Amino acid sequence: MRIVPVEKEDLPMVKALLAEVNLPLEGLEEHFANFLKLVVDGELAAVAGLEVYGKCGLLRSVAVAPAYQRSGLGQGITRAAINRARELGLTEVYLLTETASDFFTRFGFKPVERSAVDPAVRQSVEFKSACQASAVCMRLKL
């Protein structure tokens, strides 16, 4: 069990997992090169993606297959995505969440007003249309 970058042929599996856990698919393909996956026994167990905007990033599509939820895989894939952001030289990472703000505070994310988000990140599909206005906006300074 290792966390590794996705491959092109993983796209249908990733789309299926995101749909299963009710996460948006918009913008996925444009940023798929910065997604990570965790496979258990040949099955996609968890995924997380980064959208890169200059020195800022958007953490998106953090998903764990229902059979593996509450197993710690979500924490592992989230840490790996944050580490990837550091490797890419990003200085801060944002996210939007409807249900998991408590989960993300464990990693140092703090709520922030949308107006405080880097302008390039605010132009992302996630901010413009994919996530509801009620979603909590959070930031992690790296």
Image (cartoon, grey):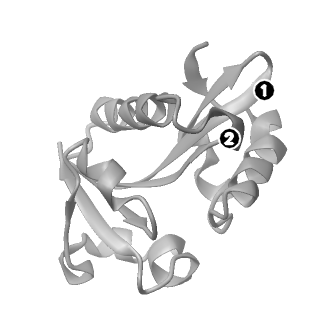
The amino acid on which the numbered mark 1 sits, given as a three-letter code, is Glu
Q: Is residue 108 left or right of residue 83?
A: left
Q: Horizontal and vertical percent for residue 93?
A: 29, 53
Whether 126 is drawn above or below 47: the answer is below
Task: Residue at 27% x, 34% y: name it.
Answer: 86
Q: Horizontal and vertical percent for residue 72?
A: 46, 29
Report how far apart the C-alphas of labels 2 and 1 lie in the structure. 9 Å
Residue bearing the label numbered 2: 65
Along the line of sight, the residue nearer the viewer: 22 or 115: 22
| Element marked by disc 2 | loop
Q: Is residue 72 left or right of residue 23?
A: left
**Image mark for residue 117:** none
Whether 102 is drawn above or below 2: the answer is below
Task: Residue at 68% x, 41% y: name it.
Answer: 65
| Element marked by disc 1 | strand
Quadrant (top left, top right, bottom left, bottom right) of the C terminus: top left
Task: Residue at 52% x, 76% y: name it.
Answer: 131
Task: Residue at 68% x, 64% y: name it.
Answer: 25
Along the line of sight, the residue nearer the viewer: 32 or 131: 131
The amino acid on which the numbered mark 2 sits, given as a three-letter code, is Ala
Quadrant (top left, top right, bottom left, bottom right) of the N terminus: top right
Residue bearing the label numbered 1: 43
Q: Is residue 16 left or right of residue 61?
A: right
- Graded by Cα atoms within 10 Å as few (under 14), some (14 to 19) or many (20 or more), the crowding at tag 1 reads few
| Residue contact between numbered discs 2 and 1, judged by CB atoms under 8 Å | yes
Q: Which of the 4 image quadrants contains residue 27? A: bottom right
Q: Mark 2 or mark 1: which comes first in sequence?
A: 1
Q: Horizontal and vertical percent for residue 20?
A: 75, 56
Q: Is residue 73 left or right of residue 120?
A: right
Of all residues shown, which one is farthest toward the bottom? 133
Along the line of sight, the residue nearer the viewer: 90 or 136: 136
